[in-house]
Image (tube, grey):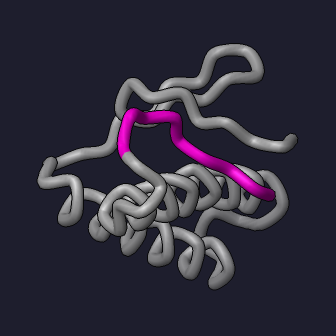
């Protein structure tokens, strides 16, 4: 899945590239843990691993963006991360 967050930063901006990558990781982490909970018991090892990976992604995103939390908004087929539209090929 190729995804990008639209923002006015330049393509050469390393911080923007890393935030973009981390925001995708957070979104995919949320998807994986929700999907995993529909397939496995909540106390399953797979679910624990997914939760740990999601927590790591959120922590890294918060550290780089200098915030204390991550805001995700889902509206029909659109995902917003911190108020920015996430664009995806799917």
> What x and y, as percent, mark residue 74?
59, 24
User: Would residue 7 be counted in the magenta stretch?
Assistant: yes
Q: Residue at x 22, y 63 (%)?
A: 64
Side (left or right) of 15 relative to 90:
left
Could you say which is closer to the camera, residue 25 or residue 8? 8
> What x and y, as percent, mark residue 31?
67, 51
Side (left or right) of 43 relative to 15:
right
Q: Which residue is drawn at 68% across and 50% down?
A: 3
Q: In which quarter of the image is the C terminus?
A: top right
Q: Is residue 78 visible?
A: yes
Q: In which quarter of the image is residue 17?
A: bottom left
* Tag count: 0
Q: Can residue 58 be seen in this view?
A: no
Q: Is residue 19 above or below residue 60?
A: above
Q: Quadrant of residue 12?
A: bottom left
Could you say which is closer to the camera, residue 36 or residue 76? 76
Side (left or right) of 21 relative to 61:
right
Q: Quadrant of the N terminus?
A: bottom right
Seen as rendered, the residue at the extreme top is 76
Could you say which is closer to the camera, residue 44 or residue 81? 81
User: Would residue 37 be counted in the magenta stretch?
Assistant: no
> What x and y, as percent, mark residue 70?
32, 44
Q: Is residue 31 above or below residue 84?
A: below
Q: Is residue 6 above or below residue 26?
A: above
Q: Which residue is drawn at 30% across and 70% down?
A: 60
Q: In which quarter of the image is residue 50?
A: bottom right
Q: Which residue is drawn at 71% across and 65% down?
A: 41
Q: Is the magenta stretch mostly helix, strand or loop?
A: loop
Q: From which residue to which does the magenta span run? A: 1-9
């Amino acid at each position: 899945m190729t995804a990008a967050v639209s923002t006015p930063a330049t393509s050469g901006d390393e911080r923007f590239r890393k935030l973009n990558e981390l925001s995708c990781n957070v979104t995919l982490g949320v998807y994986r843990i929700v999907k995993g909970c529909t397939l496995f018991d909540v106390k399953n090892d797979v679910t624990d691993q997914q939760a740990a990976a999601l927590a790591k992604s959120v922590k890294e995103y918060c550290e780089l963006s200098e915030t204390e939390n991550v805001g995700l908004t889902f509206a029909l087929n659109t995902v917003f991360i911190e108020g920015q539209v996430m664009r995806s090929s799917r």
